[in-house]
Image (cartoon, rainbow, N blue to C red):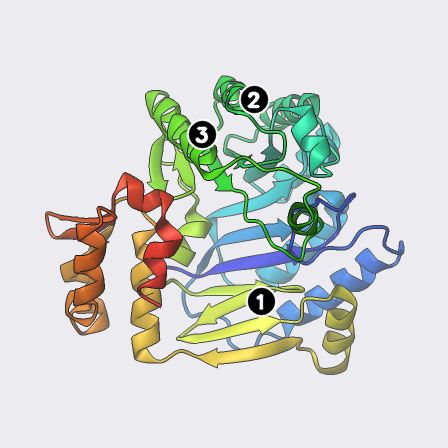
Amino acid sequence: MKAGIYIHIPFCKTKCSYCNFSFVINYPKTLPERYTSALIREIASCSDPPLETVDTIYLGGGTPSNVTAEIIDRILSACRAQFQIAEDSEITIEINPDTITPEKARQYRKLGVNRASLGAQSFNDAELRAVGRSHRANHILQAFEILRAEDFGNISLDLIIGLPRQTQDSWLNSLLQLRKLHPEHVSLYMLDLDRETRLGKDFDRGRTQLPDDELTSACFIDAISQLASDHYDHYEISNLALAGWESRHNLKYWMDAPYYGFGASSHSYVDGLRFKVEPDPERYIEQINLTGSAVVERTALSRERMRNEAFYLRLRRTEGVDLEAFDRIYHGSITDAHAEAIVRLTDAGLLIKEGGRLRLTPRGILLSNEVFQEFL
């Protein structure tokens, strides 16, 4: 599998109460330019570009659509100067619904961006306000219309399950609105409550109530069922797609392919080596300007750890793991290495083995984090 590139752009309009990613708000006007210059220098100083052609680029954040198209142009040009980018590459940009305009979408397409990931999160304004999102439901509809009008034929739309004030009725309405839009790809994320975020602290202090596990599980099951009736394939725990529209970039993470990360808080994985970059944008800029690198952590994975991580990442895909092929790639029997855990999880109804493949059951998908802990 060819390599991918991830670019982190940390600039946001507002601070979402659940977000634990690297981002900045209320930043100096000079920061995007200084950050972009550092980012381009980091890309140019990559000492080991892949022999394989890169065929995915993912612009994430933060809010990449919060910066000018000229900045996106410079970043993509730097990637093309340093790496061999396939002509049929999937190039994705994350977009907040209230940050896109027809002109900006038009410019993205001219730059070769051919996939938009639209962070809807909910079609309920009360839920959006509760977590500090800057957009409202009408912005989602407008943004989707703009992207379609400007020739985006590959749109992914995100929803979050477990938001404050979310009920089963409000969830079903959000799901209905999404189905009417019929994007090529859908991501359904369970709210990951980080205790260090504002939402996490409010929850711990009793200031915010969240839907319970029974409700969030019901919402997830409803979504998978209804989207299946619309011909979406549930191909990974949190992701569904119409035939042929899976996220090519994210498949690299799940299939142990190499990827290069650039920008604050980014990660790279190449030849069994993992790199983590400084998460603070200002310190990132400082380190890049001093040395050309802002890597703060380098990890050489042992053969056993590489195999274990590749195994549980492949288990994220609903098709499961082809055990014979996996053992051939990693030179040993994964079922022998984890025999007790696999038997225990199978007996608990979380894993099932069929036709030489091991995969999560529907219940195992809901409890996947507990399953994966067994293989770390």
- Amino acid type, residue under disc 3 in the picture: Cys
Which residue bears the numbered disc 3? 219
Taking the image as shown, residue 281 lies to the left or right of residue 28, namely left
Residue sitting at x 19%, y 74%: 331
In-front residue for pair 372/74: 372
Tell which circle, 2 or 1, labels the residue nearer the N-terminal end. Answer: 1
Does 297 sit above or below residue 212? below
Residue 279's label in the rendered image is none
Which residue bears the numbered disc 2? 170
In the rendered image, residue 71, in percent from the top left (x then y), is placed at 74, 52
In the rendered image, residue 126, in percent from the top left (x then y), is placed at 69, 26
Residue sitting at x 85%, y 54%: 27
In-front residue for pair 236/220: 220
Kindly state the secondary structure of the residue where label 3 is placed: helix
Q: Residues within 10 Å of mark 1 (few under 14, many from 20)?
A: some
Which residue bears the numbered disc 1? 82
Residue 255 can be seen, yes or no = no
- Displayed quadrant of residue 339: bottom left
